[in-house]
Every structure is written in structure tokens, then in C-alpha cells.
Amino acid sequence: MPPPERLLLGRIESPLGGMLLVTDQAGVLRAADFHDFEDRMRRLLRLHYGALAPVTGAVPAAVRAGFAAYFSGDVAALAGLPWATAGTAFQRAVWVALGDIPPGRTLTYGALAARLGRPAAVRAVGAANGANPLSIVVPCHRLVGASGALTGYAGGLARKEWLLRHEGALG
């Protein structure tokens, strides 16, 4: 997918607080994060798109509807949203692999590294997971520690727990 010509920043409300959604001119999702992590999101956007900064815009109807459906209980609703990112080839491979973890399931960092054919790359998977610019859509919250413990979610562990409960991965 070609790099975006324009980035539009819109906002929605969610049960976890306000969310920031960045789309391109075609309505493709480029970033999603929580309002209290706007600085992190903007830093990631600069890493991915250089000087192309988002301008205020409306959230496309399909993106808004996808998030509304997800938070209303259709936990698979975000899987169909078109998204694209920059990042390294390894990061993009991790992000695509995260999308293969179905709602209601979790996977350890080590298991994801093994799925990628790089079983020793557990820390690299963790770093890529932490650099994910598409919170919830690229479901980095579905990765857990080797013991099954909830670890390492940029949006905060309370949000990670809520998302996993919402998706049925936690009782």
C-alpha cells in the first residue's frame, strides 16, 4: 500500500475512555490509541510517516461503526477494518500475526515468536508489540506472559484486562 498523502485525526468515545483514530485519505486506519496516550501515538506517527502530521477530521463511518460494534459485543467487528502501517518488516509480521489470534484467546510472546519461525525472538516480539500503532485493531492485548500473567500493555493493564474480559478470554 502506498504511503498516505494525508492523515486525519478523529475522536470517539469508548467504555475505556476517549480514543484517537487516525485514517488516511482513503479511510484506511493508520493509528488508534487512547486519549491519554496521544503523545505516544504522535511519536509513533512521526516514526512511521515522518513530517506528515495528522489534521483534525471526521472518523470514517465504517471505522466508527466497527468500533461501536466491537464495544457493543461483536468482538470480531474490528477484524474487517482496513489498516496499514509503516514499521520494519519484522514489526509488520508481528502485527499481522497478532491479527491471527482470535477474540477470546490469548497467546504468549514466546508462542508468537515460534509461530513466526523465530523462537528466540521473544524480546523482539515484545518490542514490536509495544510499538503497535493500532491499539485494539491489531490486538496486542491478546499477548500474555509465559505464565499467562497480564503483562505489558501500552494502554495500561486495567484496559488490557477489560478488553480480554470483553472478548471472553478471562472469566
Image (cartoon, helix red, strand yellow):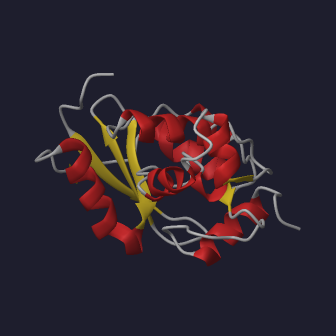
The residue at 77%/67% (across/down) is 147
**Where the C terminus falls, by quadrant?**
bottom right
**Where the N terminus falls, by quadrant?**
top left
Please tell me whether residue 146 is drawn above or below residue 111 in the rendered image.
below
- List the single residue furthest toward the right: 171
Report which quarter residue 119 is drawn in.
top right
Q: How many marks?
A: 0
User: Foreground residue, 153 or 31?
Assistant: 153
State the image coordinates of residue 44 (x, y, percent, origin top left): 29, 55
Please tell me whether residue 146 is drawn above or below residue 134 in the rendered image.
below
Left or right, residue 85 beside residue 171 = left
State the image coordinates of residue 45 (x, y, percent, origin top left): 26, 51
Report which quarter residue 56 is drawn in.
bottom left
Please tell me whether residue 49 is drawn above or below residue 44 in the rendered image.
above
Left or right, residue 142 beside residue 49 = right
The residue at 10%/47% (across/down) is 51
State the image coordinates of residue 161 (x, y, percent, origin top left): 70, 71
The residue at 56%/69% (across/down) is 152
- List the single residue furthest toward the left: 51
The residue at 66%/47% (across/down) is 69
User: Foreground residue, 89 or 105?
Assistant: 89
State the image coordinates of residue 151 (x, y, percent, origin top left): 63, 70
Q: Is residue 78 visible?
A: no
